[in-house]
Amino acid sequence: MSYSVDQVSEALKKVRYPDGNADIVSLNMVESIEIEDGKISFSVYLPVFNSPFKKSIEKACVKAIHDTITKNIEVNATITSRVTYGRIDKTQEEILPGVKNIIAVASGKGGVGKSTISTNLAIALAKLGSKVGLIDADVYGPSIPKMFGVEGIKPGMENVNGKDCIVPVEKYGVKMLSIGFFVNPNDALIWRGPMATSALRQLIEDSVWGELDYMIIDLPPGTSDIHLTLVQTMPVTGAIIVSTPQEVALADARKGIGMFRQEKINVPILGLIENMAWFTPDELPNKKFYIFGKDGCKNLAAELNIPFLGHIPIVESIRENGDSGVPSALENSILGDSFRQLGENVAQLVEERNANLAPTLKVAIDPNAKHPTN
């Protein structure tokens, strides 16, 4: 038996928004109703992201569909909110005018799982109903194509106003570009800084990104030309720092945080993520081994007065899923839930940042200065 969009809409009129006097359909909260392969999917946009009614509305939506239409159908209700702008008005933006928020994911030290976090965060935000883009800015060590299982795919080209532009590869609801799509994965890139920054600018400026709620920028480790090029090229809404809890990594994380907090750069720090926080073997499910130390990032976040976004443990499946191109954020598991919670935390922090701070601007750096902090 087939069902119509109108039937779904009528069923959802039975769901009232708890903080008002009308149903969610009349309040224009329901969008993107789709009926396909025995599943009904739709999005419900609440007034605020951290609404206390999220769970109750989701349950009420599922119940309304089952009670009114049929119990023998899967209901996928995405409960989210409108994403606010963390940049100046999009009509004034010369670069990426359709992108509401740009989030830099950085680490002071290599090997802390920054690209894994970027990948799973992008997917988590997409699963929340947001439009998401991801740029692999780690020019010398691109890993995003492998993590998404799109190695060997070549981005398309599209003529826009007489200019040939790159069309990002899309998978799992995320549009992505990486230098890895354009080079042989077995070849080492031996580029000077200007060549690397030119490549990054092309991925940003000469591509068809369209309308996005979030653009995630997976930065290389350290503080380099790539970082400076990013903040000079476009306004960055905020930065997320990834680190392991060991002291060596934390020392470098401090430098990364310090760079974004420099007066001439002034990019808000959205939060700090502790990756590889502990290891729990299968034979001892209630035991945590703190291989790299305990709560190092949590303590650093408290010291520097920045949000702590949570712990991600050492789990073999995270590595396996990244290698196989099926990231853990896609799983219906405790691990998948932890990444989805990370996505919710980041979305909430972006909303709070946009409500309390002025939109970001591009960084103006004196080309004659030896260092931007001098």
Image (cartoon, rainbow, N blue to C red):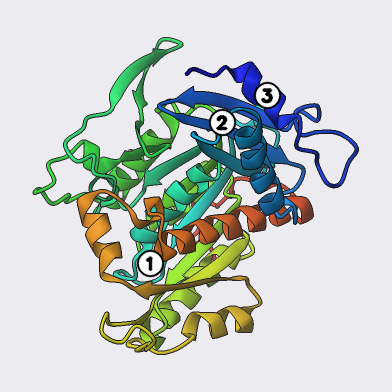
- Element under disc 1: loop
Kindly report which numbered mark, 2 or 1, lies closer to the viewer in this rendering: 2
CA distance for labels 2 and 3: 14 Å
Q: Which residue is located at x 49 percent, y 42 percent? A: 126
Residue that numbered label 2 is attached to: 70
Between residue 311 and residue 11, name the one nearer to us. Answer: 11
Residue 185: % across, % down? 13, 46
Residue 121: % across, % down? 46, 54
Q: Does 132 sit above or below residue 48?
A: above
Q: Earlier in the sequence, mark 1 or mark 3?
A: 3
Q: Amino acid at mark 2?
A: Thr
Kindly report which numbered mark, 2 or 3, lies closer to the viewer in this rendering: 2
Task: Decide if residue 185 is in sight here.
Answer: yes
Q: For this view, does 164 lie left or right of residue 102?
A: left
Residue 95: % across, % down? 53, 32
Q: Residues within 10 Å of mark 3 (few under 14, many from 20)?
A: some
Q: Earlier in the sequence, mark 2 or mark 3?
A: 3
- Element under disc 3: helix
Q: Which mark is residue 295?
A: none
Kindly report which numbered mark, 1 or 3, lies closer to the viewer in this rendering: 3
Residue that numbered label 3 is attached to: 9
Q: Does 13 sit above or below residue 62?
A: above
* Label total for image: 3
Figure quadrant of residue 208: top left
Q: For this view, does 112 lie left or right of residue 268?
A: left
CA distance for labels 1 and 3: 50 Å
Task: Decide if residue 87 is in sight here.
Answer: no
Q: Which mark is residue 222?
A: 1
